[in-house]
Image (cartoon, helix red, strand yellow):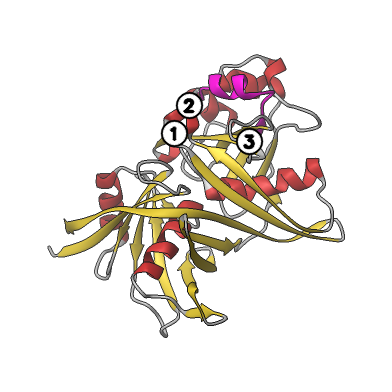
Amino acid sequence: MRSRDFLLYDVFTQRPFAGNQLAIVLKSDGLDTEAMQEIAREFNLSETVFVGAQQDGMRTPIRIFTPVNEMPFAGHPTVGTAVALSELGMSAANDNNDTDACIIILDEPIGSVRCLVSKDARGSFAEFDLPQLPSAAKFKMSHEDAAAVLGLMPQDIGFENHKVTAWDAGVPYVCIPVHNLDAAACANLDPRLWAELMGGNGDAASPAAYVYCRDTIGHDHAFHARMFSGHWGIVEDPATGSAAAAFAGAVMMFDEPTDGTSAFWIEQGLEMGRPSSIRLELDVEGGKLAGARIGGYAVKIGEGVIYR
């Protein structure tokens, strides 16, 4: 047993005690998968990151665990870890010799993820290129089933031309549009029915539910969202970058953004008392998604030592 330093960050927020909580275990050498899973279960946050030794002075390997399983990729751990490593001076390179911006390259199970970390008056902001663009997942759900699993009425499901779809940008989600903020606030996922709709599996590999509407509480946000994933050990998540990445597929299908770069903010976590803001940028060429980025602020709230 040895001591290992860890950091605590709140991610997708500019202030402490909001956003999504993240534990980052530094110098994770010597820990096997079982040990990492035990530590993640002990922290019992939506995700815990384990940082390996930097490779070639450029790339830093990380592994990401929920309380019950390992993730190939996740948004708030990527943003939070990039900010943390930049604040520890572990950047790969400065961006255009700008001392307020640097590049962090994280080697995740999904592949290398390039992050740009910058600082402004509001704090540290990290933005990363999606390692995998969203693709339609082979899963269908009727409006009636979506309403039943969320405890809503069928008329609460959908708005404008938005319908229930499923997308995967490294992690699968069923994107469920709801009529307004009232419907979003009343949504409450039934995990047993969700497992049935997943074909009786409902295991860690099956999609989570991403509920969204056009109505927002913050005037500068484009969408309001909630994410439910009890089968990942997370009843509800206050901010989910991987879901925003998958959601880019729904935005492309239903909103058909014009060529060029579009950027907008997604609010999440308000029903939990953990307000979060996620920025999604889309690069569209010839009516198709050519690239996308997820970004957000992160703030350090604590540090300590764990023994394992």
The reply to whether dot 2 and dot 3 touch (C-beta < 8 Å) is: no
Number of the label disc, if any, that sits on residue 191: 2
Disc 3 packing (10 Å; few <14; some 14–19; many ≥20)? few
Q: Tell me, yes or no, if residue 56 can be seen here.
A: yes
Residues under labels 3 and 1: Cα distance?
Answer: 30 Å
Considering depth in this image, is 46 or 103 the residue closer to the camera? 103
Q: Does residue 9 sit above or below 221 in this rendering?
A: below
Q: In the picture, which quadrant includes the C terminus?
A: bottom left
Considering depth in this image, is 300 or 121 the residue closer to the camera? 121
Give the residue type at disc 3: His
Element on which disc 1 rests: helix
Residues under labels 1 and 2: Cα distance?
Answer: 7 Å
Residue at the spot 54% in from the left edge and 41% down from the top edge = 206
Number of the label disc, if any, that sits on residue 230: 1
Element on which disc 3 rests: loop
Q: Which residue is mark 3?
A: 219
Q: Residue 54 at what x, y percent from top left?
A: 37, 77
Q: Earlier in the sequence, mark 2 or mark 3?
A: 2
Give the residue type at disc 1: Gly
Residue at the spot 31% in from the left edge and 52% down from the top edge = 37
Q: Residue 201 at what x, y percent from top left?
A: 51, 35
